[in-house]
Image (cartoon, helix red, strand yellow):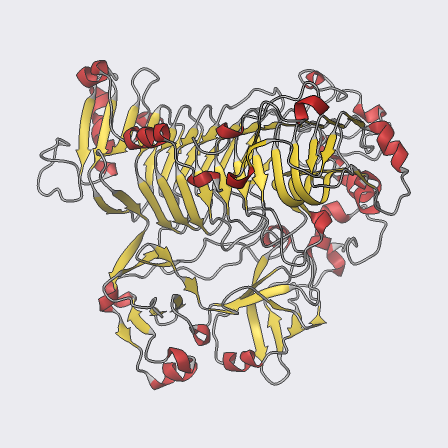
Amino acid sequence: MNKLYRIRIPLLLWLATSSLPALSHAAEKTATTYYISNQSSGSSDGSFEYPFTSLEAAKKAIREQRKNHALNGPIEIYIREGDYFLEKTVEFNINDSGTQQYPITYAAYKDEEVNLIGGTRIPLRDFEVVTSPTTLSRLPETAQGKVLSINLEQRGISKLGKMSQFGHSTGFLNAVTPYKDGTPTPQLYYNKLSMQIARWPNHDFAKVDQVTQNGSVPRHWMDDMKFSENKSVLATYIPPAERENPPLGFKFILNNDRMQQWAQAEDAWMFGYWYWDWSDQSVKIKNIDTQTREISSVQPSAYGIREEQRFYVYNLLEEIDMPGEWYLNRENSTLYFYPPEGAKDGEVTISLLEQPMIQLTDVSNVTFSGINIGTSRNSAFSISGGSNCLIKNSTISKLGKTAISIEGGKAHGVVNCHVYDLAADGIHIKGGDRHTLEPAGHYIENCHIHNFGQQAKTYKPAIKISGVGNRASHNTIHNGPHAGLIFAGNDHVIQFNEIYDVVNESQDMGAIYSGRDLTARGTIIRHNFIHDINGVEGGHPYLIHGIYFDDLYSGCSVFGNVFKNMPTGVMVNGGRDHNISNNIFIDISNKPIIIATSGFMSWQQKHWKNHSYGLKFDPRRDDITSQGGPAVPWDKAPYDKYPNMTNIIDDEPRHPKYNQSTKNVFINSEKTFIWVRGEVDFAEDRVQEYTNIRDNFKTETAPGFVNAETMNFGLKSNSIVYQKIPGFEPIPFESIGRQ
């Protein structure tokens, strides 16, 4: 079973009607209606017969209408079918707002297909077969006669951008080196499917054979390394006077004859997990020495480089060797493309727009519905401030940055959207006040998010939640290289989601992840189905988790979830005050629950002095500082609502105290809760003393599932679980996932 494909008649009926412009009789009488069509010509007044030609024109008309009088009814703008190519951001501000009583809606008309595109299309028939002897000599023999080309400048396409660095590790380069991230480069699509930039190897990764120069390590230039007493390569702080200027790239040997073909490659790049399997980074190739087999980089790797780490080389004409690959020569504006097998009359689309497609600033009570939007180098929607804006029943895909970004404001939502084929992350909602704990009330509901993090891979989840009081519910998330959902802050609700096949290219990560804050408490994670989380091939089983509370993260409730087929169900990496109860763990290969003592490891002691994990400097200790910006009032109201919070500074804050594991069910899984690790000898019985472990039930056989064959892991009313664990609450499994 995959619950994603389980069909329910009520669901089909709802989906069939939800995108229609259904209005109440009262709304029909009072609504002002406009229309947009790309087929309109001549004069237009926004009527059905003479529609506007663009969103900009409709927006302008609404502003003019509001100059004369206030809204006296809802406004609905219906977009007729067709492709609408955006050459610049469509910007909305407070003057474009509706009201709670009279909202403004932009929607596809009936069931018509509306596509907002941040790029341009070229018919495949306009390409020509490559015949230049010089170019053919650089192409693999198997691709000669099959690769096509076209000059983009001759077609008026000039904004081709530059290749730019990306990845988690580049954050450190941005901070302390001259190397900065840029706008993602254009991507290529054929008949709406993503094509692959020419690379080697075509799939998976190669490995570093021998490091000949480690290069600069900018991570060691960061201020948070200053307190290190461990002079190992992992922890040494390098003061400014001792740093290479300019920063030094790395060098390594690649013992593979393939590199002999790359001698003429210009603007070639590499992407890799150069030191850690949880931090990725792209770098430009500085030199390829085909005699010594040495490759050198322009930028350094933030963490350095190790042998046997994974990487690939990309953006080389010489590596167009299979259908679907492409390469853009920016020097002469020539696009090379090896079309898919059997391709004849299709269309090639290139993403071009560098800014968000639709931007809402301090806008309230505006809805976008039933729209396909994407094929852009930036975001589809960027929302800041305002309230009650809604994106629903839409498809958002083929984007270079965060697909939908919501920051600040109140009660913005994304509902019933299909979000996929993303170079980076999916939906980010951020809002609420961490000082007052006032919630924002943003929500992501009933969305299908998959195939994200396809270029920038780590810390680019399907959903990211931060701030206070936001919600992700009834979403289906799958096919991602790193975390499925990352959260930070207080009092969020993460419920009824199905998450699977994530963390499939990395490790030291969970399907749901948060870390490094003792004050970010109160989040509830309940009634989720997390399954088939297996990590990178050969990854360490202690580093792949269903839910991961990293680096002393504390104070969450994990209730009524189902975990299946993964190394570890829940990992508490040194944190406190977690309540893990009423969960079902099935086929967990390592340990269902781990409560680790990482707060005592030497590297954590170093970070404790500088980061303080959300706490603020206390002169009594002289070892706790605030981490960036004003610290939250953790020692007084409103934080006194969290148990064991206000007195934490005097209560052994690095000890994993007050965690609970109660009323959990372990099926074909090891019943082991404690993993003691690190340089400090910390007795297991002391952890047992700190942790309330009781009323858990272990069995090797199915305890009475509704239908395990179809992946319905709800319990029958006569399940043995209810006998073994009195008070075990039924898990509403049928309600998990998209409804």
Q: Quadrant of the C terminus?
A: top left
Residue found at x 83% / y 45%: 677
Residue 527 as seen in the image, left or right of residue 658:
left
Residue 522 as seen in the image, left or right of residue 473:
right
In the image, residue 610 above or below residue 350:
above
* Residue 731 image point, x, y percent: 58, 26
* Residue 157 image point, x, y percent: 29, 61
Residue found at x 33% / y 58%: 350
Q: Quadrant of residue 70?
A: top left
Q: Nearer the viewer, residue 510 or 274?
A: 510
Residue 356 as seen in the image, left or right of residue 735:
left
Q: Quadrant of residue 500?
A: top right
* Residue 723 image point, x, y percent: 69, 22
Residue found at x 35% / y 43%: 357
* Residue 491 image point, x, y percent: 60, 24
Is residue 619 visible from the viewing direction of this image? no
In the image, residue 23 above or below residue 617:
above
In the image, residue 682 above or below residue 558:
below
Q: Nearer the viewer, residue 682 or 580?
A: 580
Is residue 524 visible from the viewing direction of this image? yes
Label count reads 0
In the image, residue 394 above or below residue 140:
above
